[in-house]
Amino acid sequence: MNTNMIKYIARKAVLYLWCFRYEVKVMNDEFKKIGKRIKIIRIERGVTQTALAKELGISQTNMSNIECGRVSVTVQNLLKLHEILHCQMADFFKDIDNPVKM
């Protein structure tokens, strides 16, 4: 492999990693927004984090991580949350276009 080819591959790798890092940041922001909405709705309904986690069949720690945006909520759990919290699915995505405020 010649030097130009190595430089080309290195530039492509750097670009790929930069794009991947940007995508991860964007997704983390979205997770935070959805998690924050879940927390707001849960509190409005007077449900504890522990009780909600039990209803979902997950640990309280996992529920906390979802609400803080450290992990994503599965579609299956969003559907369960919709039923448990008696809200519209759209309620979880209300602030999706607004900047994150944590």
Image (cartoon, rainbow, N blue to C red):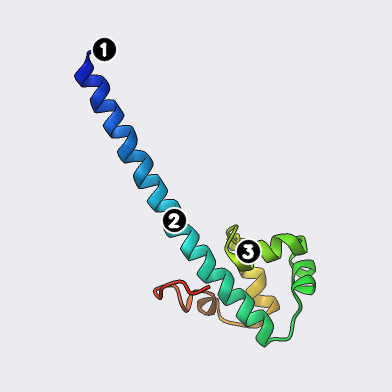
Query: What residue lies at 28% left-to-right and 26% top-to-bottom?
Result: 9
SS at mark 3 in the image: helix
Q: Quadrant of residue 34?
A: bottom right
Q: Amino acid at mark 2?
A: Lys
Residue on which disc 2 sits: 25
Query: In the drawing, what numbered circle is on residue 66?
Result: 3
Query: In the drawing, what numbered circle is on residue 1?
Result: 1
Label 2: how many residues lie within 10 Å, few (<14), some (14-19) or many (20+)? few
Relative depth, front residue between 100 and 95:
100
Viewed as shown, does residue 45 lie left or right of 97?
A: right
Viewed as shown, does residue 32 lie left or right of 46?
A: left
SS at mark 2 in the image: helix
Asked if the residue at tag 1 contacts the one at tag 2, i.e. Cβ–Cβ closer than 8 Å, the answer is: no
Label 2 and label 1: CA atoms lie apart by 34 Å
Query: What residue lies at 57% left-to-right and 63% top-to-bottom?
Result: 69
SS at mark 1 in the image: loop
Query: What residue lies at 65% left-to-right and 62% top-to-bottom?
Result: 65
Q: Earlier in the sequence, mark 1 or mark 3?
A: 1
Q: Amino acid at mark 1?
A: Met
